[in-house]
Image (tube, helix red, strand yellow):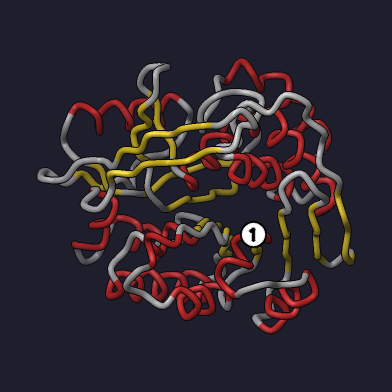
Amino acid sequence: MKRILFFGECMLEESGRGKSFGGDTLNTAVYLSRLLGGADISVGYATAMGMDNDSDYLLSQWQTEGLDTSLVRRIPDKLPGRYRIYTNANGERRFEYWRDDSAARYYFDVDPTPMEQALANKRWDYLYLSGISLAILADEHKHRLLALVRAFRQQGGRLIFDNNYRPQLWHSSDVRYWYSQIMHQADLALLTDEDETAIYGEQQLAQIMERCLAHRIPELVIKRGGSKALVLDKGGIHEIPAERVEDVVDTSAAGDAFAAGFLSLWLQDAPGSQAAEAGHRLAARVIQHHGAIIEADHMQDLTQPLIAES
């Protein structure tokens, strides 16, 4: 059995549709778990939560989705973060956050953490991090995470990194320094061109690829919204068209869904071009519904075809 562990933050989502939740790495973990169905791959999630009813609710929901939550820390005096989402007529979204003191920021307040112990014992094969996974941590905890990644890879583990960038989370840290450090450890990078531009200034695709090659990243995906995704792997460079969507309702988690679709086949050793097609399929489905995590019924037909194609 292959085992992939996600680390990051999940927050409660406030909207008129009732209680929900979301967070970039958690979104990808949930969608991946759904897509894999009966595949022999375990999906886990590591974060910190409080001891309150909302934290209990989140944990129960993740477990219902099939996630291994054994590495989640519970911190008595902390609470999960919250966000409110607004969308315009084109489905583009705007967020308000209440997360400055969320429990996830304190995951590394103990030594060792459950995740450090599990990775040291080789319980997981893949670790998935995003730019937000880094951004929520204090700098000394970023160093702990980076040391953990290095030790994990020295033991044969593989790192997957999504460059998801939220500038408001980086006001006191050097984002370029930390991204460079983590990219140098990545075995697969899932990049969004808009985030690359926001971090490094106006960028051409060739410049993004050059920077990744300098880090010796073996496999690379550049997501470009509704345009063609670029995939670089041992088979060469491929451009994979996105699926056309006429009625865009909510673009929340589009990139997270693409990552899940991609990983659902990539983890089963499918070519990167085929995995990217699966990523586009799921992203196209997700943006036709409200919320970061859509109802499972809305994507049920995608599960078995994805497995069959692998």
* Residue 9, placed above or below residue 128: above
Where disc 1 sits, the SS reads helix
Quarter the C terminus occupies? top right
* Residue 183, placed above or below residue 282: below
Foreground of the two, 259 or 283: 283
Kind of residue sitting beneath label 1? Glu
Q: Residues within 10 Å of mark 1 (few under 14, many from 20)?
A: some
Foreground of the two, 55 or 68: 55
Spot occupied by residue 280 in the image (x, y as percentages of width and height): 76, 40
Using residue 187 as the reference point, say whether residue 82 is left or right of it: left
Residue corresponding to mark 1: 194
* Residue lying at the far left of the rendered structure: 77
| Quarter of the image where one finds residue 22 | top left
* Residue lying at the far front of the rendered structure: 89
What residue appears at the point 88 percent right and 64 percent down from the top-left corner?
A: 237
Using residue 192 as the reference point, say whether residue 56 is left or right of it: left
Count of numbered labels shown in the rendering? 1
Foreground of the two, 209 or 309: 209
What residue appears at the point 68 percent right and 79 percent down from the top-left corner?
A: 211
Quarter the N terminus occupies? top right
